[in-house]
Amino acid sequence: MDVARQTEVVGRIRTDLEGLMGTRMRLKANMGRSKILEREGILEQTHPSLFVVRVEEKRDRTARVSYSYVDVLTGTVELSHCESGENLLPWLN
């Protein structure tokens, strides 16, 4: 995929995520070395190069995690609905 196409796809990912603001989602992030992190949270913010998800942790604590749109493009981060398990960005596959 050339750079112009990648830029276009990253822009579409950002636009789609802006439309999903406040949506509860499941994150599956490949952290490398066979470590996969799965969390559930609410899409809280989008910025020019990253998005922020508020996740619930143990003992009623919350944390904010951020990922870049490129992480979604490369498959390092997968986003799906909490209830149905359906991919939030089905056109990306």
Image: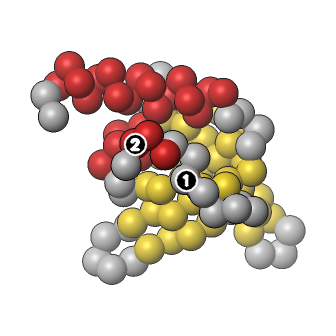
Q: Residue at x 62, y 27 (%)?
A: 18
Q: Is residue 48 left or right of residue 39?
A: left
Residue 34: horizontal and vertical position, in percent? Answer: 33, 80
The reply to whether discs 2 and 1 touch (Cβ–Cβ < 8 Å) is yes
Left or right: 81, with 35 as reference point: right
The numbered mark at residue 92 is 2
Residue in the image at 38% along x and 67% along y: 31
Specify the label residue 36 is tagged with: none
- The residue located at (50%, 28%) in the rendering is 14
Residue 87 is marked as 1
Image side of residue 78 versus residue 8, left or right: right
Q: CA distance from mark 2 to mark 1?
A: 9 Å
Where is 6 relative to 65, above or below?
Answer: above
Instruction: Give the structural element (helix, strand or loop) at label 2.
Output: helix
Residue 92 or residue 46, whichever sits in front? 92
Work out whether 55 lies above or below 88. below
Q: Label 1 amino acid?
A: Asn
Residue 58 image offset from top left, x and y in percent = 77, 75
Q: Residue furthest right?
A: 60
Q: Residue at point 39% right, 66% down?
A: 30
- The N terminus appears in which quarter of the rendering? top left
What amino acid type is highlighted by mark number 2? Leu
Query: Where does residue 66 sit, x and y in percent of width and height?
Result: 53, 46
| Crowd class of label 1 (few under 14; some 14 to 19; many from 20; radius 10 Å) | some
Question: For residue 82, which quarter of the picture?
Answer: bottom right
